[in-house]
Image: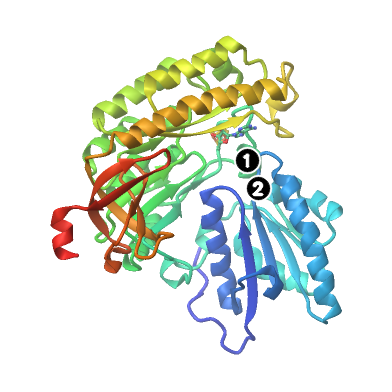
Amino acid sequence: MSEPDAARPDSSAPQKKIFIKTYGCQMNVYDSGRMADVMAPEGYVDASSPEEADVVILNTCHIRERAADKVYSELGRLRDLKAEKAARGEGLIVGVAGCVAQAEGAEMQRRAPVVDIVVGPQSYHHLPGLVARAGNGSGVIETEFPVEDKFASLPAPEKRRTLARGPTAFLTIQEGCDKFCTFCVVPYTRGSEFSRPVARIADEARALADAGVREITLLGQNVNAYHGEDAKGRSASLGALIRELAAIDGLERLRYTTSHPRDMDEELIAAHAEVGKLMPYLHLPVQSGSDRILDLMNRQHTVEFYLDIIGRVRAARPDVALSSDFIVGFPGETEADFEATLALIREVRFAQAYSFKYSPRPGTPAATRDGQLPEEVKTERLHRLQTLLNEQQQSFNEACAGRKLPVLFDRRGREPGQLVGRSPYLQSVHLDQAPAHFFGEIAEVEIEQGFANSLRGRLAESEAAFG
Ligand code: 5AD
Ligand code: SF4
């Protein structure tokens, strides 16, 4: 499929403004950027608030609890704004995108008539047409999973205005999931697994590097299930893709998220040993430390299988920082199951982690199972779990004191003259009185102190000499 020419915005078209509000995960951040890209050739520029926008899109996420409620309350505010604008003779088109849109579909417009457009994650390239139709007064819903490749219909990388907004960027390489964990909506909202071809990803990564990006995080709901087509028409694994991307000049760091234990293959583990640009960090959700619960979750792996992978990754890259996701209070979880999760955490020692109380998602198998646990039990278990995880995170950070770490500075700090960046282990590192030209660059920092959520350092002597 050829890519539409998005290079030249139509200069005769009046300038219009779009406000895209992003909820949830990094994939949504990436998608919001792509939505802005497809609207740019139509004359749309970013609005700084819904008040000054002609089009407002809520790019929603379904993973977190009460996600749909939050969207509906935002739509209540937009209904008032639309009425105020109408009184002034101004129009406002309201769209809902992302996983809540996908899950709710037509129901959305019934519950919130303010909504003009409901667009699922696979249909963003149709947004200009949907906005035009909505402007003519017809409500439009597009939540089918079309067979065409939405990525191929997006503007070519070098033509994207939102391409690089700093030294770090996300790049979606894979979407959807075929795993069907019994708690998860992703297979229903994002559809079945799809991998972009290697050449497309490499083009986008090169364009990002040319635009000043030093670090790319490869994204996918099940990113290590990646199996995109390579130049020879064969299927390439994530490990092979990482090797290819590591050859790009200017690109210094690669990361990937989120992985599934079953898809950690030898090639990927070997990449951790052999590809210097692949950062020593692995986010590998385990969800529970009880085989019984893992089975009920349909995770397709045991605790032993998980620990074996961790052992092999650590053998490949001894300093790797490990991160995970945990769910407490899954239906049927006993105190003994929960304690098995604590035992797994003690055995692995995580540098960082995300943890959640189980919350039933309509349409998923676990939502209607017997053995749903009372809220107080979930709250108490989450508290114990997080206390342990926070201790581990803090001791990982404290152990960095005295080390010299390369830091990619990608943000300005709250204090004047302060820059904030990321260590190889994804920790935030604060540097006072940082030379301004360090922004967007990697510099060696001597870590002075580790805290619960960040590190503080000073310039290593070799760097200070040039600063
Ligand atoms: N309840 C609680 N946590 C969930 N997650 C996904 N679905 C649910 C749910 N129904 C968590 C998992 C997943 C992360 C992205 O969100 O831990 O890995
Ligand atoms: Fe959801 Fe991840 Fe399980 Fe896929 S592997 S169903 S995205 S939790």
Residues 249 and 378: in front is 378
Reply above or below: 352 against 22: above
Residue to which mark 2 is pinned:
99
Circle 2: element type? helix
Please indicate whether residue 467 sits to the left or right of residue 353 in the image: left
How was this image coloured? rainbow
Asked where in the image residue 345 lies, by quadrant, the reply is: top left
Using a 10 Å C-alpha cutoff, classify the residue at mark 2 as few (fewer than 14 neighbours), some (14 to 19) or many (20 or more).
many
Mark 2 and mark 1 lie on one chain; the one further toward the N terminus is: 1
Residue at x-position 42% and y-position 28%: 391
Reply above or below: 28 against 259: below
Do the numbered discs 2 and 1 sit on residues whose CB atoms are within 8 Å? yes
Q: Position of residue 445 (x, y in %)?
A: 24, 51
Residue at x-position 69% and y-position 66%: 56
Please indicate whether residue 97 sits to the left or right of residue 292 in the image: right
Q: Position of residue 170 (x, y in %)?
A: 44, 54
Using a 10 Å C-alpha cutoff, classify the residue at mark 1 as few (fewer than 14 neighbours), some (14 to 19) or many (20 or more).
some
The kind of residue tagged 1 is: Ile
Using the image, tell me which numbered label, if any, was put on residue 63: 1
Please indicate whether residue 118 sits to the left or right of residue 442 in the image: right
